Image (spheres, rainbow, N blue to C red):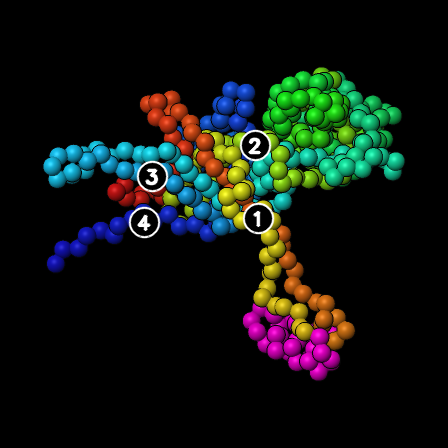
Amino acid sequence: MSTSPLRPAMVPVTRQIRAFFAPVNRTTETPTIFDPAASGVFALDSPPAPWLDLGWIEGFERFYDTPTDVVRSGTSTFPAVQFRGPIEARVEFDFREWGKLQMALAGGSEHMNVLATSSSATPAPSGGTPIPAVAVLPGSTASQLVFGAGAVGGFAFGNLIAVDLDYQQQVGYVGSGISAAYVSNPAAVNNDANYVRRVTFNVGRVAEITATSVILAQPLLAGAPTAGASAQVVAAFVDREGGSFFQEWSALFVAEPESGGRVCFYYPRLSPNPGVGRGGASLKSAAGWKPPKSGGAANTNATANTQGSSAGSSSQKFLREEFAEIAGPLMSVGLHASFIALPFTDTNDGQTVLCYRSYFPAAMAAVY
């Protein structure tokens, strides 16, 4: 009896998917290109520029909503030609981590930096009148911002700071490096000189302070500050439900190979579409435990002991009586993101596409 050689694994297996995003040039609608031949097997902790690592994601789902139909001919109306209807594709998932870019993508509209204010500032939901900006001096780099001996005292270790130009009543996209908002009417933003820094993605965290400058934990996304840029302390981030601006990004989702090959899903142009799916934030309990109902010490202790016998919650039976009523498991707040894919014309053959799926087979895996 003859035997055939073992068939090398052709089944990609993964435990998790990692998300990378890169800006689209909104003026020309030019996406960031992912070339699988040039950078398909990059180290996930070191994506090629300008791709930004947004961490692991959960609940990754792809929807291809493009209908197909046929042209029928002949007396028996047999199918003669097949064609595609209006193309449409969507992506949904949950970010595991919170950050400025994750919030912007989950929200979909302008994402605001809440600039630090004085106690006398006029309040506003997205931040009131801010503390005046500090000019960034020549000699600054993407990682070190020079302010001068006196001005550097306005910043402290750990501060978040936004670095960008003053708004000068221009119409169009604003934000260094990445289009952060579109202004169609200067009066709508109150001709606010700080508006660009309110929305810019050019944000960093102070990791060290010298006599005349601050050193950032990560380089600014837009690189070295443009001449005339200023900096302001950021107290928090805020996004909004509503608005007329839509974010647009190139996206790459990589299934980390546990065994077998790597699979990449590349979307040249994704626009957040949070109205399609469920809400943008959700509470996720780290355990199935629920607080016991009130009703005296006997009920409280019984409930705690019962829950303590279940798997994964043994610590609950040691709760003190007076804290049992308010105790609960840790909860994570998830960021749900939903996107619609926008069309891209492939320069190799002129075809209009929404997504590319790349497969990098494991070493010595069968070809087919």
Q: Nearer the viewer, mark 4 or mark 3?
A: 3
Q: Nearer the viewer, mark 4 or mark 2?
A: 2
Between the C-alphas of marks 3 and 1, the distance is 27 Å
Q: Is residue 296 magenta?
A: yes
The quadrant the N terminus occupies is bottom left
N-term mark: 4 or 1: 4
Stretch in magenta: 294-320
Kindly state the secondary structure of the residue where label 2 is placed.
Answer: loop
The crowd level at tag 4 (other Cα within 10 Å; few <14, some 14-19, many 20+) is: some
Q: Amino acid at mark 3?
A: Pro
Report x, y in % for residue 142.
Answer: 67, 26
> Do the residues under discs 2 and 3 have CB atoms within 8 angstroms?
no
- Report the disc number at residue 279: 1
Q: Amino acid at mark 2?
A: Phe
Report x, y in % for residue 109.
Answer: 60, 35
Q: Which residue is mark 4?
A: 9
Report x, y in % for residue 292.
Answer: 67, 73
Q: Return the residue nearer the eye: 172 or 283.
A: 172
The crowd level at tag 1 (other Cα within 10 Å; few <14, some 14-19, many 20+) is: some
The quadrant the C terminus occupies is top left
N-term mark: 4 or 2: 4
Is 81 on the left-hand or right-hand side of 289?
Answer: left
Q: Which residue is mark 2?
A: 246
- Report the disc number at residue 67: 3
- Report the disc number at residue 338: none
The crowd level at tag 3 (other Cα within 10 Å; few <14, some 14-19, many 20+) is: few
Q: Return the residue nearer the eye: 141 or 190.
A: 190
Kindly state the secondary structure of the residue where label 3 is placed.
Answer: loop
The crowd level at tag 2 (other Cα within 10 Å; few <14, some 14-19, many 20+) is: some
